[in-house]
Image (cartoon, rainbow, N blue to C red):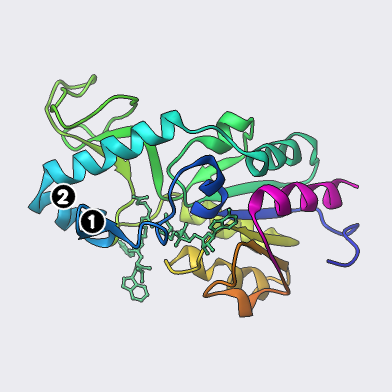
């Protein structure tokens, strides 16, 4: 990785791979199926319109899994970096789990939404939610039975893109952890970072669709690579 002394601003992109060792299955491990439906079909507005019960059950299950999961050493290492790094830092996660936060990280942005948040289609309010939606609970704000998972589905605009692009434009270092680089716009961030003259590092179990864009790729489990890298950066 060469000298790290001229690094001030860091952007980190995380994907399902950082939560794999917490027992949360990745999209690839699931061979992309949910009850014989491709996830791309379930995680879409059309899928929700076509079969709301199937989609609500899918996210009720994901909410339960998230609640039962624990942060792993990779989440803990990023939380330590967040606490000790006095430059700019933004953890942009594609994950809908709250393991970064439960490990203690604060500068976290969920670009694809959160499993433990719901969104009312009637009044647009968002609420923290640990339970299920299958039984059609009323919106705490307006009482309508119109709650959906607060998740960015395929075909929907990810959250806070302007904030993400601004952080990447200022970044000296862009690190991608545990993502296959299969889904856009997240998969394109490394190219924007390189165009902004940031150094780019990938930490992943295997080579990804985007590996050729990175200055350096380290292969291995996040629970080993991330603590090692954080110690290197903080040294
Ligand atoms: C949008 C929430 C536009 C849901 C998610 C054709 C070509 C190019 C693009 C498109 C196209 N057709 C459509 C598109 C756009 C589409 C897209 O990219 N599709 C793909 C399938 C081609 N993108 C969108 O629709 C996005 N929106 O473009 O909007 C727009 C414009 C104007 C106005 C309105 C809209 C929205 C995409 C968001 C979808 N929601 N998540 C949910 O979670 O249920 S996507 C979901 O999959 C994840 O969030 C993530 O983004 C993506 C991929 O998942 P990964 O995190 O990478 O996980 P994966 O399993 O794939 O990989 C895991 C990696 O970890 C592997 O590499 C593995 O080796 C590694 N790993 C495993 N174990 C470990 C490990 N690494 C380290 N340690 C370990 N232990």
> Residue 146's spot in the image, x, y percent?
14, 33
Determine the residue positioned at 72% across, 54% down: 225
Q: Is residue 63 above or below residue 233?
A: above
Name the element at disc 2. helix
Name the element at disc 1. loop
Give the residue number, with chain letter if any, for mark 1: 44
Residue 116 can be seen, yes or no: no
Residue 235 as seen in the image, left or right of residue 56: right
Q: Quadrant of residue 216?
A: bottom right
> Residue 33's spot in the image, x, y percent?
27, 58
Q: Quadrant of residue 178?
A: bottom right
Is 95 included in the stretch rendered in magenta? no
**Which labelled disc corresponds to residue 48?**
2
Q: Assess mark 1: CB under 8 A from ligand 1?
A: no
Evaluate if marks 1 and 2 touch, with contact meaning CB atoms under 8 Å apart.
Answer: yes
Q: Nearer the viewer, residue 20 or 192?
A: 20
> Residue 202's spot in the image, x, y percent?
66, 65
Which range is magenta? 218-235
**Which labelled disc corresponds to residue 54?**
none
Is 227 included in the stretch rendered in magenta? yes
Determine the residue positioned at 55% across, 60% down: 165
Give the Cα separation between the discs numbered 1 and 2. 6 Å
């Amino acid at each position: 990785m060469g000298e790290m002394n001229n690094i001030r601003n860091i952007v980190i992109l995380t994907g399902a791979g950082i939560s794999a060792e917490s027992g949360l299955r990745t999209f690839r491990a699931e061979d992309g199926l949910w009850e014989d439906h491709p996830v791309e079909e379930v995680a879409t507005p059309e899928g929700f319109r076509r079969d709301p019960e199937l989609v609500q059950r899918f996210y009720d299950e994901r909410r339960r899994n998230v609640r039962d999961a624990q942060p792993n050493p990779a989440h803990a290492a990023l939380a330590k970096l967040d606490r000790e790094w006095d430059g700019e830092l933004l953890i942009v996660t594609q994950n809908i789990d709250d393991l970064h936060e439960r490990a203690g990280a604060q500068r976290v942005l969920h670009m694809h939404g959160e499993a433990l948040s719901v969104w009312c289609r009637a009044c647009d309010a968002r609420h923290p939610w640990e339970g299920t939606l299958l039984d059609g609970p009323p919106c705490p704000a307006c009482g309508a039975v119109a709650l959906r998972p607060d998740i960015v589905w395929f075909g929907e605009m990810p959250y806070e893109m302007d904030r993400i692009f601004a952080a990447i434009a200022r970044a000296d270092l862009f690190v991608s952890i545990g993502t296959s680089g299969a889904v856009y716009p997240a998969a394109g961030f490394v190219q924007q970072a390189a165009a902004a003259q940031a150094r780019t590092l990938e930490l992943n179990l295997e080579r990804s669709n985007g590996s050729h864009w990175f200055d350096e790729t380290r292969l291995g489990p996040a629970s080993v690579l991330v603590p090692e890298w954080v110690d290197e950066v903080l040294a």
